[in-house]
Image (tube, rainbow, N blue to C red):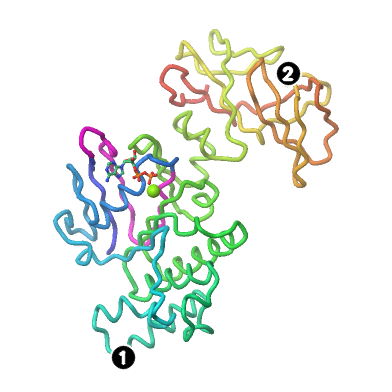
Amino acid sequence: MADIVIDRVVKEFGSFRALQEVSLTVKDGEFVALLGPSGCGKTTLLRIIAGLETQSSGRVVIGGQDVSDLSPRKRGLAMVFQNYAVFPHMTVFENVAFGLRMQKAAQAEVKRKVERAAALLHIESYLDRYPAKLSGGQRQRVAVARALAVEPAVLLMDEPLSNLDALLRLEMRTELKAVLREAGTTTIYVTHDQTEAMGLADRIAVMYGGKIEQIGSPLDIYATPATRFVGGFIGSPPMNFIKVQSSHGTARIGDAALPCPATAESLELGLRGEDASLSANGSGIPFDVRVVEPMGSHLLLTGAIDGQLARIVAPPTAKVNAGERVGLTVDPARVTWIDSTTGRALARA
Ligand SMILES: Nc1ncnc2c1ncn2[C@@H]1O[C@H](COP(=O)(O)OP(=O)(O)O)[C@@H](O)[C@H]1O
Ligand SMILES: [Mg+2]
């Protein structure tokens, strides 16, 4: 079993606290993404799991064993980093074989495992080439194949696709997901790209300021963000936050009234752009459209609700013009209510 338990891990660099009591359990065979903006502590956490960095306090347990005092090599995991190093003086075959050679595997086993990893990543036709003759995406696959060739129980990846162009990134993402599912590898994948995390992960841990804000399936995190930060970080366009006046469990925006929690003094309506629809007769929440962007699959409308910036997604053929005031209908079951003071989501009314 290669489950990973991160138990109240703290990391301090001098007086700066980069990780504040982070706890997370990754199940055997699960794919968890660590997602958050630059500087939130993702790499630091991954390096602590790998053993490349020592935590200030807390424990890391892999497969039931406390590995806090074990060197990286003894932790039985493989890593792929953003600046993946392929060895230029070695052929693709020898690059992929590297970890197996370190383990002093027999030649027949090396050959078998290299060929298997190469086939999974579709690089079998250039095993004899040197990295200089490969594209960036091919080199990236070599780095991933090298990590997979040792058949690690745990694979750690830090922004492994960020050096690739958008199209290749999409292709590699799909491939990685299929390959790792097939191999049943326990994976922790660091990224600042929410679409990557949503597409790949069984569960996402959203990090901010050295803390995990929320852990859940991509759908959970999208549909029920725990905080304003999570709502604003996940989804494209990001969730809109509109300060509203409320009394006795009813929020009023223009002539629209929405049931809301009565517990907070200061409330914000968290509304996803795709959860609002244009009303037929202009009734509902008034939305002043400033810019209309035809995106092909939809229209992206940018404007204001009660003077506050909002982005709404409309059908591609909707008749909306910049400068117009339209009405929005929302399903009360699909909105998020945020306590303005704490930034935390409240239970729905
Ligand atoms: N070796 C270090 N010494 C001092 N501060 C560091 C060191 N490594 C990282 N940090 C700081 O810790 C915070 C988290 O960094 P990092 O884990 O690299 O973030 P992320 O990978 O999410 O972008 C940042 O503020 C960074 O400047
Ligand atoms: Mg990083």
Q: Give the residue displayed 43% in from the left and 69% down from the top.
A: 144
- Please name whichever residue, 72 or 328, is drawn nearer the observer in this view of the structure: 72
> Is 47 positioned to the left or the right of 291 in the image?
left
User: Which of the 4 image quadrants contains residue 328?
Assistant: top right
Magenta span covers which residues?
A: 12-35
Q: Amino acid at mark 1?
A: Gln
Q: Give the residue displayed 44% in from the left and 66% down from the top.
A: 180
> Mark 2 to mark 1: distance in Å?
71 Å
Furthest residue to the bottom? Answer: 108
Q: Amino acid at mark 2?
A: Pro
* Vertical comparison of 194 with 17: above or below: below
Residue that mark 2 sits on: 286
Badge nearest the viewer, 2 or 1: 1
- Please name whichever residue, 75 or 139, is drawn nearer the observer in this view of the structure: 139
User: Which of the 4 image quadrants contains residue 334?
Assistant: top right
Instruction: Decide which of tag 2 and tag 1 comes sooner along the chain.
Output: 1
SS class, disc 1: helix
Circle 2/circle 1 CB separation < 8 Å: no
Q: Is residue 293 magenta?
A: no
> Is 330 positioned to the left or the right of 247 in the image?
right
Q: Is residue 18 magenta?
A: yes
* Vertical comparison of 338 with 78: above or below: above
> Is 114 positioned to the left or the right of 318 in the image?
left
Residue that mark 1 sits on: 107
> Is 78 positioned to the left or the right of 66 in the image?
right
Q: Give the residue displayed 45% in from the left and 73% down from the top.
A: 142
* Image coordinates for residue 88, horizontal then vertical, percent: 41, 75
* Image coordinates for residue 207, horizontal then vertical, percent: 39, 40
The secondary structure that most of the magenta stretch takes on is strand
SS class, disc 2: strand
